[in-house]
Amino acid sequence: MAQLEDLRLLDRALAQLPADLRAVFTLSELEELTFTEIALALELPRGTVASRVRRAKERFTQAVRRLKSEGMR
């Protein structure tokens, strides 16, 4: 049951990310691609991927905290 709740939390937190950040976050954190692989897949400069992943992680963490404080868990 806790695993299902974790998946719901993941889904809701991901949904709060803008599409560009959600894409790099998913490829980096869930698919475990390197920044270079993501850059090639999305046709972006590697530096852009790195900065988007950093921002995505920050926003994802904020979303998870907010959802938990609102009772989503």
Image (spheres, rainbow, N blue to C red):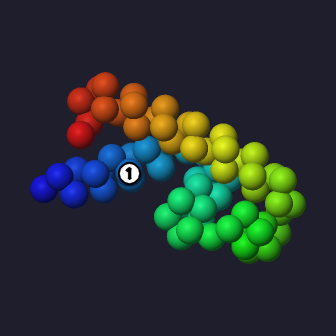
Q: Is residue 71 visible?
A: yes
Q: Quadrant of residue 34?
A: bottom right
* On-image quarter of the N terminus: bottom left
What type is the residue that disc 1 sits on?
Answer: Leu
The residue sitting at the left extreme is 1
Q: At 82% from the left edge and 69% from the top edge, which residue is drawn? A: 43
Kind of element beneath mark 1: helix
Q: How many marks?
A: 1
Give x and y (percent) for residue 19. Answer: 62, 52
Q: Quadrant of residue 36?
A: bottom right
Q: At 51% from the left edge and 41% from the top edge, which residue is drawn? A: 60
Give x and y (percent) for residue 11. Answer: 39, 53
Q: Horizontally, is 41 left or right of 1 in the view? A: right
Compared with 30, 25 (above or below) is above
Of 48 and 14, which appears nearest the observer? 48
The residue sitting at the top extreme is 69
Question: How many neighbours does mark 1 have within 10 angstroms: few (below 14), some (14-19), or many (20 or more)?
Answer: some
Q: Quadrant of residue 28?
A: bottom right
* On-image quarter of the C terminus: top left
Q: At 53% from the left edge and 59% from the top edge, which residue is drawn? A: 29
Give x and y (percent) for residue 46. Answer: 83, 60
Compared with 38, 63 (above or below) is above
Q: At 38% from the left edge and 51% from the top edge, which residue is drawn? A: 10
Q: Is residue 42 visible?
A: no
Q: Which residue is mark 1?
A: 10
Q: Horizontally, is 71 left or right of 51 in the view? A: left
Give x and y (percent) for residue 55. Answer: 66, 40
